[in-house]
Image (cartoon, rainbow, N blue to C red):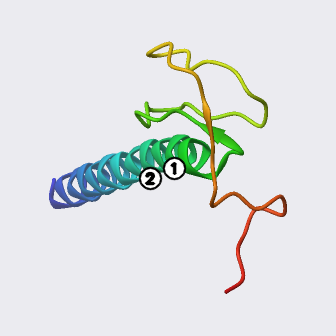
Amino acid sequence: MKTVKTILGVLVLALMLTTVSCKDAKKEDATTKTEQAEKKEYASAYVCPMHCEGSGSDAEGECPTCGMAYVKNEDHKASGHKHD
């Protein structure tokens, strides 16, 4: 009987640890998607003046969210990074 309780306790503990570790992985994925959207919004050659989420393009056009015309991003570098 003592062995059954020990095995059951170990299984419950393992299940709890697995559940907690999986929740952390999902949070990292959500952060990564947000960071990618922000990167496009600020790192594209043309950006929305309202900085709408996920907006930005390498060609002139209109923001799909608010409909405003994109403006040239003065901080944009073709290589994707800046050197001061």
In the visual, does 57 lie left or right of 49?
Answer: right
Residue 27 percent location from the top left of the image: 37, 47
Residue 82 percent location from the top left of the image: 70, 74
The quadrant of the image that shows the C terminus is bottom right
Name the kind of residue labelled 2 in the image: Glu
Residue at numbered disc 1: 32
- Secondary element type, mark 2: helix
Front in this rendered view, residue 20 or 67: 67
Q: Residues within 10 Å of mark 2 (few under 14, many from 20)?
A: few
Marking on residue 28: 2
In the visual, does 10 lie left or right of 67?
Answer: left
Front in this rendered view, residue 21 or 12: 21
Residue drawn at the location 44% of the way across and 52% of the way down: 28
* Inter-mark Cα distance, 2 to 1: 6 Å
Q: How crowded is mark 1: few (under 14 residues within 10 Å), some or many (20 or more)?
A: few
In the visual, does 59 lie left or right of 16?
Answer: right
Residue drawn at the location 50% of the way across and 46% of the way down: 38
Residue 5 percent location from the top left of the image: 17, 54
Whether label 2 touches label 1, CB < 8 Å: yes
Front in this rendered view, residue 9 or 72: 72
Residue drawn at the location 37% of the way across and 51% of the way down: 18
Residue 37 percent location from the top left of the image: 53, 40
Name the kind of residue labelled 1 in the image: Thr
Mark toward the viewer: 2 or 1: 1
- Secondary element type, mark 1: helix
Total number of numbered discs in the rendering: 2
